[in-house]
Image (spheres, grey):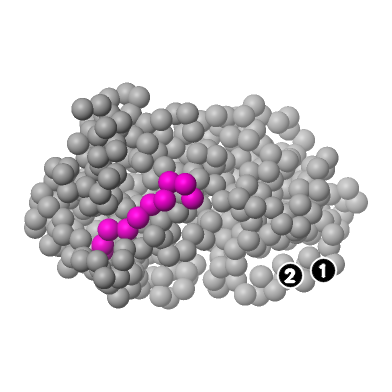
Amino acid sequence: MTWLERLGRRRSSPAADDSPRRLLVDVSTIAQHDAGTGIQRVVRGIWQHLYKADLGDVALVPVAATARRGYGIGAFDPVSGSFSLPDPGAPLLKARAGDMFLGLDLAAHRLARHERQLARWRRAGASINLVVYDLLPLQRPDWFPDSTGRNFRKWMKVLMRRADRAICISGQVSRDLAIMLEQMSAPRRHSIERHVMPLSGAMEQSGPTMGLDSRGRDALDRMEGEAGVLMVGTIEPRKGHDCLIAAMEYLWASEADAPPLVIVGRPGWRTEPLQAQMRELETREPRFLWLDNASDELLAELYGRAALVAVPSRGEGFGLPIVEALRHGRKILARDIPVFRELAQPGLSYFDDETPPALAARLQEVLQKPDPAPVTGAGWDVSAEALLRALGIKIDPPAVSRSS
């Protein structure tokens, strides 16, 4: 049977019951709402390449759960690139020996709520594989809502009790997980395999969201021909918007030709005073613009026009804006934290002093540097291949399409 015949047969039935093994990919959150943030780009990027891959006798199946109902088989529309939740009347999914559950989506509260279902799957011979984006809600609970901390603690207990593999998005997250499992004296800590799946900056390969509104066009106009600064990230305490804005205000007060600043990020949590400050700043400072609902299409255009991308985040699991900006050949100024050191490339500079005068001076210094050559870097195909190797799914090169 040819690969195309196998591909068609695997997708002819949502359950793919004729396949001896199934890769059950959790898309619970994105199926209900695609927020268009970094994690959604990861989910779309990985799924798109798994969907195109020749997985041999393994069927690819989207699964999802809600707060009230356990995991069932969802659906994926390749035309729109969107996911749908299982039919409310459909039976819950029963896993069997050889199946592999992949917790790709960030759905901590749902996973813990349906732990018994996962336990049944594991008793039936299925494996439980969880993607670990970061451990920050446990390491720095002050950066997150109380509910996030509670849900994440429950998720961590599921990982400790049920996971066969933890697929970490950076070496730093893998090391942090090993330390945390030891600190928590997890009984199964030596049985949980840890693997690293690097992420990609190839936005065009992740089923990008589209659309340019009037504010987006205004932002592009402001960046045209100016040495503009771009920052990308949800408005939350750890991202460092506060120190970057303070540094830019310092520049605007002292330099008539100081660059504009465009921030792309949805309103987050525990930053209401900062968000109010940003709204007020827009009314009095023509060199500042906050886009709180930008599409991937607009973001890619902004990367292409920015003179510098600032990444002042105080804590990350990877640093997706860095690899996205590098792919566009942008200069980057990032906080000097270990996880960002893993991404070191020409064009990426660091700072360690966030006081306004020091950060402003560092911004000006980096703006004067020549633009680096675009760093093509790994595509989502490489991420998907790393994931498949971790899962023990043998593939024959080229396993994943590189034509996207």
Residue picked out by circle 1 = 283
In magenta, the rendered stretch is 71-80
Quarter occupied by residue 4: top left
Q: Residue at x 56, y 68 (%)?
A: 268
Q: Is residue 134 visible?
A: no
Tag 2, which secondary structure? helix
- In the drawing, does residue 19 fall left or right of residue 148? left
Residue 229 in the image: x percent, y percent?
A: 73, 48
Quarter occupied by residue 122: bottom left
The residue lying toward the viewer, choosing from 68 and 142, is: 68
Q: Which disc, if any, is residue 339?
A: none
Residue picked out by circle 2 = 279
The residue lying toward the viewer, choosing from 179 and 397, is: 397
User: What amino acid is found at the position of numbered circle 1 in the picture?
Assistant: Thr
Q: Is mark 2 in CB contact (under 8 Å) with mark 1?
A: yes
Q: Residue at x 56, y 51 (%)?
A: 209
